[in-house]
Image (tube, rainbow, N blue to C red):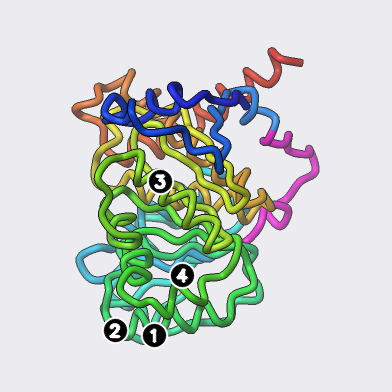
Amino acid sequence: MKRLSFSQILEKLPDGSIHSMIPEEPEYKFYSVEASDIASLIPTRDTFAHKGNFGHALLIAGSRGKIGAAVLAAKACLRSGVGLLTVHIPVCGEIILQTSIPEAMTEIDNEQDYFTTLGTLSKYHAIGIGPGLGCKEKTSDALLNLFEKVKQPMVIDADAINLLAQKDHLQQILPHNSILTPHPGEFDRLAGSSENSYERLLKACHRAGSYKSYIVLKGANTAICTPDKECYFNPTGNPGMATAGSGDVLTGIILGLLAQSFSPLNASLTGVFLHGLAGDIAASEKSPESLIASDIIENLGLAFKKINYFCNQSE
């Protein structure tokens, strides 16, 4: 990791030039992630490995009209190398999931259109929740139930973050070492509006500490804020990734890595880097303008290959 100076931090922000009169924040340490850092985090698979070696993930996602978000997150999770994936989905999404992703198993909610009930959690190694979830009151109650029972590492995205913003009591019982992946709008709902991107970044660093969790503040140079007063800027990605479903893909990737026993920090760093790298490959083959979230998933394999190649060249 490369330690960043204050001026280099400002260069990572979209409106960094307006912060030239703001004093440096001494409380936090800022770093730039490099390809060699990520290459060192991805283990080589053993010849005799089987699917049980790579974890079982649970993805809780989807509601009527937003089942596509669950599909994108599930496909990305599978492409990230997870051994097994179960998707908890409302009744309306069962046929869609079973036909579009034959590699995934499904667990069907009691409700027709949105998430309300939990199944058995003990068999899973990591849990992801949020893509396309909706914000119904019963969904909020089910999220509370999940937070009270969960013992596995979690990645929390989209409507699950919006529910956190609406319900203070959910924030109070947020499981430690969770990974939250808000875009700036979702983060502002959670932490209040900010006058500029630097203020938002410092708020994200502070929230990571108070939650004792990790906040992945999405955008150009996505920032991974840790509970240990450190922040890591990601170098991969491009404006073409500002498209519907891109965040759902990131959730799936991080979930898959968590299930494979990556630590929350390493899952965040690796997931964000691979997500951006796959998006860069997709943009170079198509164009930033035509890039869609599915293109990111389709290029995850090439992103892994690039990282593996870098690792081999470094040895």
| Cα distance in 3D space between marks 2 and 3 | 26 Å
Q: Which mark is residue 141?
A: 1
Residue on which disc 3 sits: 217
Residue at 44 percent of width and 36 percent of height: 275
In front here: 288 or 223? 223
Q: Which residues are magenta?
A: 41-57
Q: Which mark is residue 106?
A: 4
| Cα distance in 3D space between marks 1 and 4 | 21 Å
| Residue 249 appears left or right of 225 | left
Q: Amino acid at mark 1?
A: Asp
Main SS, magenta region, reads loop
Looking at the picture, how far across and down is residue 27, in whole percent? 56, 43
Looking at the picture, how far across and down is residue 123, in whole percent? 65, 72
> Which class describes the residues within 10 Å of circle 1: few (<14), some (14-19), or many (20+)?
some
Question: Of callouts 1 and 4, which one flags the residue occurring earlier in the amino acid sequence?
Answer: 4
Q: Quadrant of the N terminus?
A: top right
Dot 1 falls on a residue whose secondary structure is helix
> Which class describes the residues within 10 Å of circle 2: few (<14), some (14-19), or many (20+)?
few
Residue on which disc 2 sits: 137
Question: Of tags 3 and 1, which is closer to the observer?
Answer: 3
Residue 33 visible, this orientation: yes
Residue at 43 percent of width and 46 percent of height: 202
Cβ atoms under marks 2 and 1 closer than 8 Å: yes
Cβ atoms under marks 4 and 2 closer than 8 Å: no
